[in-house]
Image (tube, grey):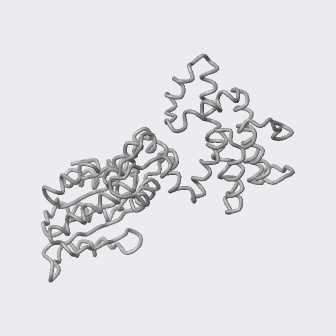
Amino acid sequence: MRLPPAALVLRLEKQLDQAYLFFGSEMLLVEEASDQLRQAARMRGIDEFIRLTAGIDLDWQGFLEHTRSIGMFSTRRVIEIRLPTGKPGAEGSKALLSFVEQDNKDVILVLLLGQTDKRAQTAEWFKEMEKRSTVVEAKAVAPKKIPRWIEERLSSRGLRVEPGVADKLAFYVEGNLLAAAQEIEKLSLLLDNGEILTDELLEKSIFDQARFNVYQLIDSCLQGVPSRALQILTNLERNGTEPILVIWAFARETRAMLEMAMEIHNGQLMQAVLRQHRVWSTRLTFVRQALERHSEGYWRDLLARLSELDQITKGRRVEVGSSWDQLERVALSVCGINIKLSPTF
């Protein structure tokens, strides 16, 4: 039986199965599903857990011995095996097949894999596990569904969210569920139960984190506020932020702006373009202002200049002046100040 992580809780409320296999590209969901299983096992009085990892302390013969011997003070036990490569090898395959054929009700086997390709899923041991156990596949959450995932997670912590804020957090974490989960845990400690997470509170929560400050820098440039943009840029430099991170963030935004500018240039309405590119409500005004401020050609030339800066920062080209000096010129230019970025720009 193959289930998504969200369906596991209901299954665990009804029964504990003999074996479980957790795998998928989203390791946060894999780990959380295994945590739910451990909790369900403890609630049923199981307190003996044996954890083994392939390549570290896993011996397949020893595993089989664990399945055949019962602890003195425990009637059931959970044996958890991590397979970082997703492949147990010939000896491991035989051991797993032997276990599922035993119908051993005193042992619950849990296999933890990472991302497992289609070919690995056609292996005999995998197919037999799927036939005789509960398989939980943690697929990657599609980018457009991450804001909803964030809202649901906030709700599970007793928090509500202001419209558009979940989209903003999703943008900040770039689809990284682990980063989103960590930020949500921090927010749940900062906010009271039932409190609404506003855009202001989110900004305050992440203000001291360099990666998020880079996004604030970009937004200040799009808004056309040079004083704030330069202040953030100076703080990033003083705090030891790598300039390549700032260049990357500018390039990421510039690509999006170029795509939107091209579509508008080809006759599409700006409102429709903003909607198609899922620009959230809190950014609509200044993204629109930046598109009105600069032409399609500007964004194209800026992207070329950022590519040059990327090469210079990596030591593949030489140019007078530091990367931070050049980034200051980029920031002022995006703000709308008529400034020459380089001899080739």
- Determine whether, in the image, residue 38 is placed left or right of residue 31: left
The residue depicted at 21 percent of the width and 48 percent of the height is 1
- Determine whether, in the image, residue 130 is placed left or right of residue 331: left
The one of 222 and 267 positioned closer to us in this rendering = 222
Total count of labels: 0
Q: Is residue 6 above or below residue 303?
A: below
Q: In terms of image quadrants, where is residue 302?
A: top right
The residue depicted at 68 percent of the width and 38 percent of the height is 224
- Determine whether, in the image, residue 245 is placed left or right of residue 159: right
Locate residue 225, reporting x and y percent: 68, 42
Residue 85 in sight in this render: no
Locate residue 3, reporting x and y percent: 25, 48
- Determine whether, in the image, residue 200 is placed left or right of residue 324: left
The one of 41 and 164 positioned closer to us in this rendering = 164
Locate residue 89, reporting x and y percent: 36, 62
Residue 38 in sight in this render: yes
The one of 267 and 61 positioned closer to us in this rendering = 267
The one of 156 and 247 positioned closer to us in this rendering = 156
